[in-house]
Amino acid sequence: MSEERVRVMDINRRTIVKYGLIVLLALFILVYPTQIYGFLMTILGVIMPLILGGILAYALNILVKRIEKHFFPNTKMKWLKKSKRAWVIVLSLIIIVLILAVVFRLVIPQFISAWTNLFKSVPAIFTDISDFAQKLNKNSVISEQINSMNVNWSSVQAKVMKYFTSSLTNVFSSSLELVTGFAKGIVNFILAFTFAIYILASKEKLGGQINRVSKAFMKEKHREKIKYFLNVTDNMFSSFIAGQVVEAFILGSLCAIGMWIFQFPYALPVGAFIGITALIPIIGAWLGGAVGFLLIAVESPLKAVLFIVFILVLQQIESNLIYPKVVGTSIGLPGIWVLAAITVGGGLAGIVGMLVGVPIFATAYTLLQHSVRGRLNSPKLEPDPTSEKD
């Protein structure tokens, strides 16, 4: 048997084995879909802190890289060179904590004060209700109407007590689940945060290890394609996060200025809080607006209603003008495609879809753009005069 024939038979055998394994895997998925889904969800739950840590590390790395460029870039002190990354990480965390502390320092005391005043006014409300009930009781016509209804008050009392008993049981059960979930969330956050710090502290070492593994098990052309794809994705996501921060600052500032002009109370704290929540695309402003409504409603229900009208107008301006322009400019995506990405992402995956829909769409847009240029053998496409400027 010739060597060529042996080689061909070996290739055919490996092909048969490969496709046979694929068919077996497909049949296994079809026969045991529930078990496989449960197993995958269990694995996902176990590694979720690591996934969150990687996401947190990526977001923090955007700030770390910018600070690192200006943190003693030309120092010759060996101890500073060795500890530079640690100092930059600590400084980045301090900046984030200070920003959050300032915002919550503005919002939380005002929120507590407003609700304290509300609870102080509760006795007066009950007094008014009691006075109104006494007036009704003194009215003979109304009293006769109530008595003629033949209401079985014992039955009503029994039903009310049964309702409150079941409600207390449900509240206790829900509280227990809430405490358990909260404790689990705290543990997962600590694990994710620790993992993120380790990634930031040794990102060059991790990158070198991944590079060596890819060289050992992948062909060079495949490595280059993956590297190119990851570079484009990283550029889109980092630019998106930076644009999101700029947009949130603009929205918070516009909200505070508008509230000050229209003489709404709590302009600065509400504007700052809306700026923080605006980091969540489109719906973030509504979350901050809900807090603002509650604060203002305690002082003046009419102003709270007018504040909702103000937020509606501001939200329309932000969603259709500010957000597509600011974020679209930061990632090189026309505004119309930003709106399309948010709509599709939100429809498919809710808030998470809104968060990642724009950078994913921008990545696909850039890859397609580069592919078109390559196929047309043109270093640069002629701009479309009818499109927005990227």
Image: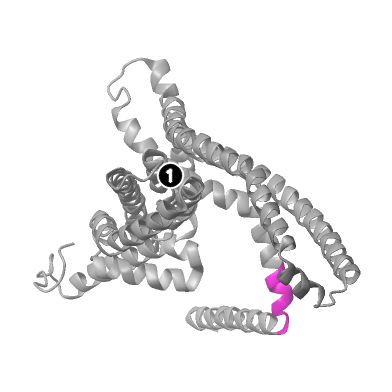
Q: Nearer the viewer, residue 389 or 3?
A: 389
Tell me if 307 is positioned left or right of 197 in this view.
left
Describe the element under mark 1 as helix, strand or loop. Answer: helix
Nearer to the camera, 29 or 174: 174
Residue span colored magenta: 31-38
Which quarter of the figure is the C terminus placed in? bottom left
Residue 77 seen from this side: yes
Kind of residue at disc 1:
Phe
Residue 215, placed above or below residue 160? above
**Residue to which mark 1 is pinned:** 273
Q: Is residue 335 magenta?
A: no
- Pick whichever, 283 or 237, lies toward us: 283
The answer to which image quadrant residue 227 occupies is bottom left
Q: Position of residue 269 (x, y in %)?
A: 42, 39
Residue 26: x and y, percent?
Answer: 63, 82
34 magenta-colored: yes
Label 1: few (<14), some (14–19) or many (≥20) C-alpha neighbours in 10 Å: many
Q: Percent x, y for residue 317? A: 27, 61
- Closest to the observer, 282 or 253: 253
Q: Is residue 242 above or below residue 345?
A: above
Q: In which quadrant is the N terminus drawn?
A: bottom right
